[in-house]
Amino acid sequence: QNNRSERYRCYFGTAMSIAPIKNIVIVGGGTAGWMTAAAFSKLLGNQYAIRVVESDEIATIGVGEATIPPIRVFNAMVGIDEDEFLRRTQGTFKLGIEFVNWGNIGDSYIHGFGKIGQDLGIASCHQYWLKQRQSNAASELDNYSLNTLAPRSAKYIRSVPEMATSPLGDIANAFHFDAGLYAQYLRGMSEARGVIRTEGKIVQTILHSETGFIEAVILASGEKVTGDFFIDCSGTRALLIGQALGIPYEDWSHWLPCDRAIAVPCASVSPLLPITRSTARSAGWQWRIPLQHRIGNGHVYSSRFMSQDEATSILMNNLDGEALAEPRYIPFVPGRRKQTWFKNCAAIGLASGFFEPIESTNIHLIQTAIQRIVHLFP
């Protein structure tokens, strides 16, 4: 109990010295801001007033278009209908991630979601496979999973729960979707549940003179937005957690040398594959994310080992279709905030940290941060 009280003092101030939380202010929209608003408005009900402050003048990164299976849990949690979600976000199904050229040039393997094979008795399938492999009686492990076989034939089927003992009974999948459209979709859901959106650019953050807690943010229009608890979804600018509260950023470049990304959409091609593709390049890797209306492409690389022109050339020469826009350049410093929750502010998304999304995990980091904050809420 003493440890719990100490944690609450750390996050919320000395017990009984502040009023109960009633007003939640989310600074920044985009994927992180509207995922947070959608989850809070669903899970916290009408006990809290929730406001999102965002500016149309400030562009979002918007390249987090590939996910891992727990996104289905989040979507169900906030009340999303899967068919409508796919229509509204130009989404497609994803059975795994294909890695090309990572061992040797020409190599390819698929990290499929879900199970490999069917468990037999008390032993797992892979144990039987290892035994048979010793006597050359088993083929490649990929051949024992629907999630690795189906993408190579451009196939997908939803799980059939009625066939519980069949491999068709529990097919694991995630999604590809347009992150900007996903944010718009969640915004509509959130506003329908009472979330207030305020358009405006923040020019000042007001801190309490004694506690250092955030009291309000001031917009360029002069409007003052007060709150009891603030969520920083302002991206790499980290307006609250970094600029206002001074929490330093921990640079992980010595572990993760990639520090640049180039993104460009191209025209869709057939067949539509239910996988994300990650292709190794000489100083980084290239992503390929198939959506209904286009393919999202990008090249993540280390500027210490490759120039921007060379990285751009590699990307543009390895598109499956005609480029639909000019390449967008995204510099970043891999790492994280030393504290992602300080006083009455928690950072979610890029405000809390960023590293190359090699296993499609950046949206998942938003999701798990939201869930942890909800669990800790008074």
Image (cartoon, rainbow, N blue to C red):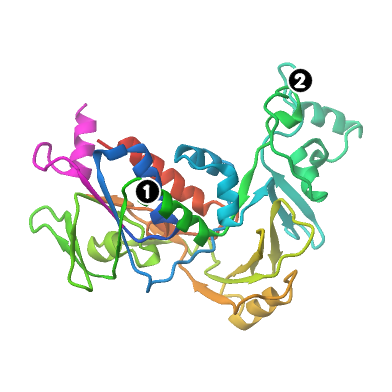
Q: Residue furthest front?
A: 192
Distance in Å between CA atoms under marks 2 and 1:
48 Å
Q: Quadrant of the N terminus?
A: top left
Query: Relative to the observer, which residue lies in front, 304 or 24?
Result: 24
Residue 265: percent from left, percent from top: 63, 70
Res 120 label = 2
Could you tell me which secondary element the residue under label 1 belongs to? Answer: helix
Q: Is residue 147 visible?
A: yes
359 left or right of 317 in image: left
Q: Are marks 2 and 1 in contact (CB under 8 Å)?
A: no
Q: Residue at x 72, y 58 (%)?
A: 102
Q: Quadrant of residue 284?
A: bottom right
11 in magenta: yes
| Residue 247 visible in the current orientation | no
34, above or below 77, in the image: below
Name the residue beneath numbered marker 1.
192
Residue 125 percent coordinates (x, y): 76, 27
Mark 2 vs mark 1: in front? 1
Q: Give the residue drawn at x 23%, y 60%.
A: 245
- Foreground pick, 49 / 119: 49
Residue located 40% across and 40% down the image: 371
Q: Position of residue 338 (x, y in %)?
A: 34, 55
**Region in magenta:** 1-26
Q: Is residue 240 left or right of residue 321?
A: left
Q: Most extreme residue toward the bottom, as rendered? A: 309
Which amino acid, by three-letter code, is at mark 2? Leu
Residue 360 left/right relative to 340: right
